C-alpha cells in the first residue's frame, strides 16, 4: 500500500475544516463548500448504495441544503429549538480513489451533542466524493452512515 501523503494531508485539512464549520454553526460558509450538483445523504440502511431509490434520513440537493440551513439559523423547525452544541472527532481518513476529477475518501466520525444537559454520541462512517480545484476541494457527495440509523434517533438540531 502506497499513500500520497500530500493529498492525504490536504484532504484531512479539508475534512477538519468542514467539521469545524459545522461545530461552530458556520452554515453559510459550509454551503459554499459544495458543488452545484452535490448530494448530502444520510441513509437508513448501512448496506444500501442506491440512495436515490431507497429511504434516507436525508437526501439533500443544493436547494434542500439551503432550506435545512435556513431552518437551523431561523429557528423555523422543532429541531432548531434549544439548539445544542456539537464536537466532531474525525479520524481514520483514507483516500480510496484519486484522479484529476475526483477524490473519494472514507473516514470515521464521532459526533457528540450536548443539548438540554444531555450528552448524545453519534458514531458514523462518512464517505466523501470531492472535486479537486486549484483552490482546494468542493464536496460533490457526502454520505453519513450512522451506526444506529435504523434505530431510534431523537430530533437533531445539527447537520451531520
Image (cartoon, rainbow, N blue to C red):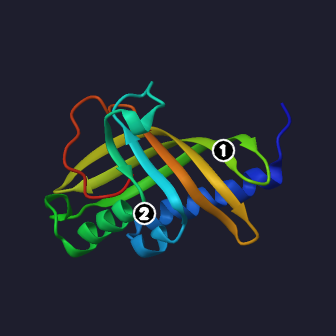
Residue 79: x and y in percent read 19, 58
In this view, the residue in front, 83 or 151, is: 151
Quarter of image, res 72: bottom left
Residue at coordinates 63% horizontally, 54% vertically from top-left? 130
In this view, the residue in front, 2 or 35, is: 35
Q: Residues within 10 Å of mark 2 (few under 14, many from 20)?
A: some
Could you tell whether 38 is left or right of 51 in the image? right
Residue under label 1: 104
Q: Which label sits in the foreground, 2 or 1?
A: 2
In this view, the residue in front, 45 or 6, is: 45
Q: Residues within 10 Å of mark 1 (few under 14, many from 20)?
A: some
Residue at coordinates 42% horizontally, 75% vertically from top-left? 28
Residue 64: x and y in percent read 34, 60
- State which tag comes first along the sequence, 2 or 1: 2
Local SS, label 1: strand
Residue 55: x and y in percent read 31, 35
Residue at coordinates 52% horizontally, 58% vertically from top-left? 37
Pick out the residue farthest to the top: 47
In the rendered structure, are the residues bearing label 2 and label 1 in contact, judged by CB atoms less than 8 Å apart?
A: no
Q: State the mark number for residue 62.
A: 2
Local SS, label 2: helix
Amino acid at each position: 500500500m502506497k499513500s500520497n501523503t500530500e493529498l492525504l494531508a490536504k484532504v484531512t485539512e479539508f475534512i477538519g475544516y468542514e467539521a469545524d464549520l459545522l461545530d461552530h454553526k458556520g452554515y453559510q460558509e459550509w454551503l459554499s463548500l459544495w458543488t452545484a450538483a452535490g448530494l448530502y445523504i444520510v441513509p437508513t440502511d448501512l448496506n444500501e448504495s442506491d440512495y436515490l431509490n431507497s429511504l434516507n434520513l436525508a437526501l439533500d440537493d443544493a436547494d434542500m441544503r439551503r432550506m435545512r440551513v435556513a431552518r437551523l439559523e431561523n429557528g423555523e423547525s422543532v429541531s432548531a429549538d434549544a439548539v445544542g452544541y456539537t464536537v466532531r472527532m474525525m479520524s481514520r481518513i483514507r483516500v480510496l480513489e484519486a484522479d484529476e476529477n475526483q477524490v473519494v475518501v472514507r473516514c470515521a466520525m464521532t459526533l457528540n451533542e450536548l443539548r438540554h444537559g444531555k450528552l448524545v454520541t453519534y458514531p458514523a462512517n462518512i464517505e466523501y466524493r470531492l472535486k479537486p480545484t486549484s483552490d482546494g476541494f468542493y464536496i460533490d457527495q457526502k454520505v453519513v452512515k450512522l451506526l444506529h440509523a435504523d434505530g431510534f434517533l431523537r430530533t437533531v438540531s445539527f447537520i451531520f
